[in-house]
Amino acid sequence: MKNPYSKDLHQFLTGKRLLPDELPFTNDLILLHHQNGYLHFHHGVKDFNCNRCGNKDRELFASFHCARCQKECAYCRKCIQMGRVSECTPLISWNGTKLISITNHPLKWNGSLSKGQQLASDRVEKAVQERTSLLIWAVCGAGKTEVLFKGIEAALLKGQRVCIATPRTDVVLELAPRLQQVFPQTDIAVLFGGSEDRTKNTPLTIATTHQLLRYYRAFDTIIIDEVDAFPYSMEPMLQYAANAARTEDGAIVYLSATPSKEMRRDVRLKKLDSVVIPARYHGKPLPVPQFEWCGKWRAKLGKGRVPINVKLWIKQYFNEGKPIFLFVPDIDLLEKVVGILQESYGEEVAGVHSKDKERKEKVARFRECKVKILVTTTILERGVTVPNVQVGVLGAEDGIFTESALVQIAGRAGRNAKFPSGDVRFFHYGKTGEMNRARDSIRRMNYRAKQGGFLNE
């Protein structure tokens, strides 16, 4: 057959750069398409440079005797969790014309935007149309997702592909139903580790930033939500993946409540466009954290007790029927705190952490008020909204609680328009610079919102 062409292969591979083992097609079909110019074979690893994740650190490469090339073959250990890419393993991408499907993607949303949201929404739409970069610097609870709707619609109506990427699976799972609700006629792929949508190519994709390693020049617009969050903020590999997944002239929009020093510097130097939303959508100020000394809390936990002021704080809000978030530094401490609190509150206390297989179910029970006290690590500092929640941090001086983390944790309170305030308490055994900077950051945003007429106090 002359010039063979498989629409299925085209559909599957457009915008991706994958290992041969990831393609559900025969080797003969792949080779025929390559010979006829439809596929491009990239070096997986060349001269200790990984073309999938951008790794150039020689210590993060290893070698093995390869059955394919019969040589000692170097492979990248940095992105090994996505499948082994080596010197003799090609990364395969589509080299023919792109599939462009201009269909109707109506936005079905009847909500209204605040003044700050409307300004940001207009700027997002402009960035998408002019294919530029933009930072949306917005306080926790500003309604960042709603700000994206018009920009996403503008891209989809032009037949362009859009990806919203975020470092946390929890946030992906929270965003997906919201986007599907407002774009009911749009096919959406939801990608995270183990996702069943991994083979889908859709106009709108919602993914963890790790999943971007599979894409190459795929998206006309990439939106990085929570750009300051771990691991994206600390991992050059993920930043490389985001740039590689974007078309060469594509738009990129960053969302953050606490942008990095580097990003703020780029804004000052006019290297990055930005728009600030200093107030929440409901126009009420952000709850400012209170600092409360609680003594040698680690020693007390070791004796099976929580500090008395922490105990009284929990008791007060439990008796008032208000949900309580209590953040602790690590899993071992979490298990101790949960065990102690369950002696008084039984099954109305639960604990969640990154290794907890029942995390989603426990968070769902917390939202449904079946669990009244949820003890958590920083895994839930973002992406979870519970009306009328009161927020405490036990051991706020611990190094895990950076300025960014503490701002996000404080941002769990007061997000709902019916309950726009809340108690945020940092229990500590000595104040830290991170604690002070977090509180100052919140106060500055409240002041800026008031000066700009965004607050309704």
Image (spheres, rainbow, N blue to C red):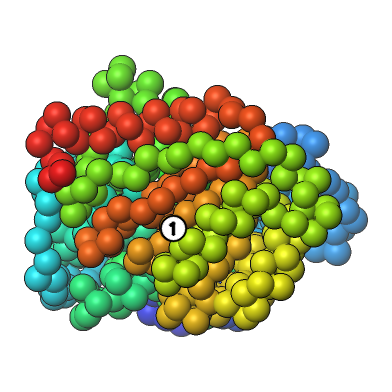
Residue 101: which quarter of the image? bottom left
Looking at the image, residue 158 sits to the left or right of residue 86; the answer is left
Residue at figure coordinates x 47%, y 54% from the top left? 391
User: x and y percent of residue 233 in the render?
Assistant: 52, 40
Under circle 1, the secondary element is strand
Q: Residues within 10 Å of mark 1 (few under 14, many from 20)?
A: many
Residue 433: which quarter of the image? top right
Residue wearing tag 1: 390
Residue 21: which quarter of the image? bottom right
Q: Residue furthest right?
A: 65
User: x and y percent of residue 87 in the render?
Assistant: 73, 50
In this rendered view, identify the residue nearer to me: 157 or 311: 311
Q: Quadrant of the C terminus?
A: top left
Looking at the image, residue 314 sits to the left or right of residue 277; the answer is right
User: x and y percent of residue 195 in the render?
Assistant: 53, 75
What amino acid is found at the position of numbered circle 1 in the picture? Gln
Instruction: Give above or below for 268 relative to 64.
Output: above
Residue 121 in sight in this render: no
